[in-house]
Image: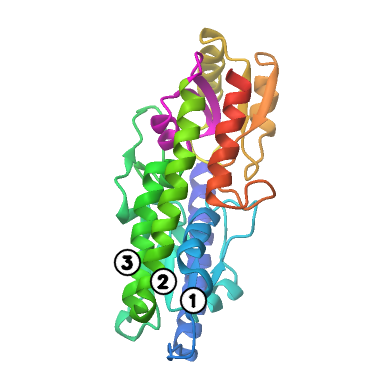
Amino acid sequence: MFKERKKRKGAIILGASLLIVLALFFYYRTSQTVTLTPDSKLRVTTTIFPLYDIIHTIGGDRIELVSLLPAGASPHTFEPTPEVIRQISQTNLFFFAGAGLDSWATFLVENNVDKEKNNYQAIDISQAVILMPFTDADLEHEQTDFDPHYWLSPANAFLIAQSVTNNLSIQDPENESYYRANLERFQKELEVAIQGWQEKMQSLEKREIIVFHDAWNYFADYFALDIVASFEPFPGKTPSPKYLQTVQTEILAHDISVVFTEPQLAPELALALASDVVSQVAILDPLGGLKGRDSYLSLIDYNVETIYSYLQ
């Protein structure tokens, strides 16, 4: 009964918080008017760094671009502030990750009951790719049945960049040739990088990894890695003792010597439980924006190099 009361109380608090956010959103949307003039740049807003960098690569100096999440923050646990609501209200194009990753952004878009008076165009980038379903029936993914970390497959970066280019060109047709030239340049750079990544990863004999949470299905699928287990089936959700025992069993069964954590999520529980069965801990980064991984290409390169250095 206590757990039920606690759950109902949490739901009430969450509902109230979302109502406050929605009220702020409507206030700023109706009190601010944004119009693109021939002399002004397209105002673009996005939620996470990988999208930010691809949009910046395509849009270049023809757009004003803002990323809502600070470097090192997790979109799973991020809560929009009044400043975030104001920023969205003043944009022309709002690119969000979708697929349950930045659910607060999806909430703002889906609950905008007066869409005809919108000053911005909302683009769910997840609709540009084919999403991978979570396949482990034992895991409880509370917000979505699909893995929302689709940008971690370099193949999807082509699709993301194409979608960004199309949408920028629709909103700003005078600069379409500029956007498409940048798209072509990005595609060529990505193709060269992919060749190096594939050569390195294909040389690995050991391909089993343990990760902190289920963010790496696209990356593992693209580079033919085997994710043996993850410590958190969903970020911020404490795994059960039975589940953690299963993870430890998998670590021993596959002779895993390293656990890969993430800079956006606190790994203390995983590290404490893994300390008896693994000898090394390394960091994979699904989001980037930090030093040494401050572009999409350098983010993927960092993760390839990290895995290669520990599995070779």
How many labels were placed on the picture? 3
Q: Amino acid at mark 2?
A: Tyr
Q: Amino acid at mark 1?
A: Arg
Q: Mark 2 or mark 3: which is in front?
A: 2
Residue 88 shows which numbered tag?
none
Residue under label 2, please give it.
Answer: 178
**Mark 1 Cα within 10 Å, few/some/many (few <14, many 20+)?**
some
Tell me where residue 217 appears, x and y as whole percent. Answer: 42, 34
Q: Amino acid at mark 3?
A: Asn
**Mark 3 Cα within 10 Å, few/some/many (few <14, many 20+)?**
some
Q: Earlier in the sequence, mark 3 or mark 1?
A: 1
The residue positioned 37% from the left and 50% from the top of the image is: 158
Residue under label 3, please give it.
Answer: 166
Magenta span: 203-231
Q: Secondary structure at mark 1?
A: helix
**290 sits left or right of 186 in the view:** right
Tell me: residue 269, above or below residue 74. Answer: above
Q: Earlier in the sequence, mark 2 or mark 3?
A: 3
Residue 62 shows which numbered tag?
1
